Image (tube, rainbow, N blue to C red):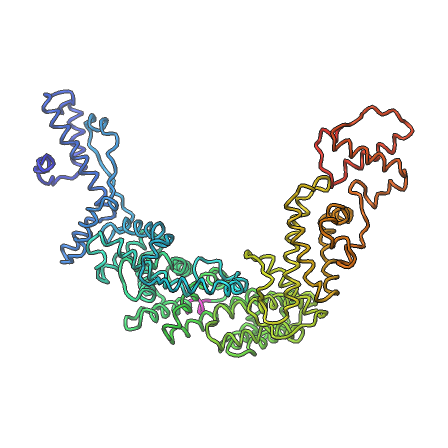
Amino acid sequence: QRLLLVLSIGLVNEPIAHIILQRAKKRKNGGEKQICEGSFFEHYKYTIDKLVTMGLINILLACYENCYFQACFNGFEQQMTELDHIFVSCAKSFSLLQIEEIKQVVSRLAEDTIELHVVPMKYTAQFPFSHLLHRLCQKQLVDQIVNNPKIMALDETIKIEDVKTEEIKMEEKKTEEIKTEDKSQSITKAGDKSTKAMQSAKLLTIVLAEFSSLNDCSEETCQMYVTDVIMETFSIPINVVSLLKDIILCITCTVCGSISLANCETVLYFYGDAVMQYITIFSLIKEADVSQSRISVEKTLSPFDRLARITNDLCQYFSNINIDEFILVMHRLCVAMTPIISLMFEFSTKHKSREVEQLLSQCRAIEVRRLCMAHFGLAAFSTETKDIGGQIHSLSSIGLLSSDEVIPSILKAAESSGLLKQNKYPHFIHDLLAIAKKVENMNNEKEQQAYKSVVTKLFFDTEKLTATTSNGIAMVKLQRLEEMARNQWIDKMMDLDSSEALLLNRVLERIYLDSTTTVDLNVNMLKNNRVIEKISKLKALLTKHTYWIAANVDLMNFEGNNELFKRLDECVSLLSQFANEDKKLEYSLHIWFLKQLYQLKGMDWTQALITHKHIRSTFPIFEKDELSAVFSKLDFCDPLLCSFDPFIRMYGNIYSKFRKQIFSSLKNDNIDIDYNDKQNFTPLLVAASSIVGWSATKFDKTSLSS
């Protein structure tokens, strides 16, 4: 009531600048009353009126931000009841519209000055409180929907049967995890991403139910909302906003099947990386060319086809620019295209589209153009070099995986050009295959078989297909063999003494050493070559143990080290795997085990550990000849003496005696510094000096300095 009384004076149709000027003139002439003048009731009335006015201004500042009131008034004028209903429902929400507290109340009430407030204005909004709603939706997705399994379990699409099926298949997945570990670093797989997005959109719809009309917005109103979110979130030119809005709405329709506020917000969360890459592509186009470029947004096409057409037109722009301009943008462009192409492949199986084929053809041409520039330079497009860039483009135009002869023919063309150095062939092959996997649909069986055939040829016929050095051939073979092993493409049985078996062993060792899962000897990754795989597993497991032993064992005091004996027990079990199968392999494995310890700690340290009486009494494999023809050949080595110590030859037993005495004194912390035997002083000094420099001992600085 008091506020209505204050506002009853009506509108003041006078410019603010004129009011301030008149106020200043009155103060200058002394015509204005001072704040200390007047009765108590006048002061009381003035204070209350100003207080309620301050409260009203704080509310209006929140409602006028980004012209939200204007969006509501536009709804009145255009008879769009949605906008005014949305404005009212959002304004009633304490969780959404938070009005700031009035600051410095007393000092502001005491001052007799005119207060001017700047309304926050980042853009002119079309949808009431759009940036507040966007912030609320993203917070709900992060905090309560996506990362909360209990809320996810409320969705009717998640069945208990699915959980049971997953438990049954856990053992089968152990093998699959090893094969696909390098591809499973993302939170969700591509196929599961859209399903999770749809489930999250349903839950977000429930959250937004407290705001009446938000879940019933028309498509036109949702377009206004998306436009506001783009203006708020992304810094892009005005002439790109409408195009990016169409892209987001096309992705929303493709993923969720319809356009709603909850669906749009969910797509911005799950497919935000693809949206950002579109923005990157827009930033690579000259601003003057954006408006001039012919980018189609045909409403007659399906949303997925429209998205493919827009992307295709963007790629067409980069295909038409000259080579000097292309060099400046090619790397960022190809990086940006990666998640976009993945998005197209994700839904191309559901939506058979000619537009996607045209898009992939454009992407293939761009990637091949970048490949030629990266490896051949500008000479790739010169007539003097027979336009090798044009040749490769022509060969790849039908599809890099349309047959298993396309990539070999490209390699032959690159070799005949003379522009590619021999040591650069492995890099060229690696990049060419990466492009093939990126721009060709690897979900199709035909492309999969063609790619498998190419990789297999590159491994077994490397010398015929490439003109690289011997080191380059080995690198190509290793790269391809790892891919073959992870995908179980090795159909040939390899002889244990062959070079291919050696490479396979190296590849499998690396895979198992890098694996974050427990290596199980009973779970095989390969269909054949099981002996090589077993050797690789044993070496990987033994390597992890040897590194721990080398870092944590003190030869002077390890009898109470339970972890050491636990690990040695596991090592003995691994070293005995070939005891009843192949003595030759067992012998080689034992030699290899000693070699690893030698490399880490040296020969004396290794021999002292293996021949220690406590170790040999606990683990007979290190002593008995029938259990190991390697470890039993090692003679006892005193950890206090070095078998290659040259001073033993020079000073004989007196030197050895001094070393043992000094070691004993250091260990018992009982050092006799009063020594008067000058005749044997030199052997004593040499013994003390050699102990200080011996890396295997660990004594405190005080004892050593004594």
Identify the image quadrant of residue 485.
bottom right
Identify the image quadrant of residue 320.
bottom left
Q: Would residue 48 be found to the left or right of residue 441 on screen?
A: left
Q: Is residue 643 above or below residue 539?
A: above
Residue 485 visible at all: yes
Q: At which x and y percent is residue 375? A: 58, 66
At horizontal 71% and vertical 28% (from top left) the residue drawn is 702
In the rendered view of the protein, which quadrant contains the C terminus?
A: top right
Looking at this view, is 52 or 363 the one in front?
52
Extreme residue toward the right, this view = 679
Q: At which x and y percent is residue 308? A: 37, 69
Q: At which x and y percent is residue 568? A: 67, 51
Looking at this view, is 488 or 79 the one in front?
488
Q: Is residue 372 above or below residue 137?
A: below
Q: Is residue 229 above or below residue 16?
A: below
Q: At which x and y percent is residue 495? A: 70, 72
Q: How many marks?
A: 0
Which range of residues does the magenta coloring cover? 316-321
In the rendered view of the protein, which quadrant contains the N terminus?
A: top left
At horizontal 10% and vertical 21% (from top left) the residue drawn is 39
At horizontal 22% and vertical 59% (from top left) the residue drawn is 221
Residue 422 visible at all: no
Secondary structure mainly formed by the magenta segment: helix
- Residue 134 falls within the magenta-colored stretch: no
Looking at this view, is 496 or 12 the one in front?
496
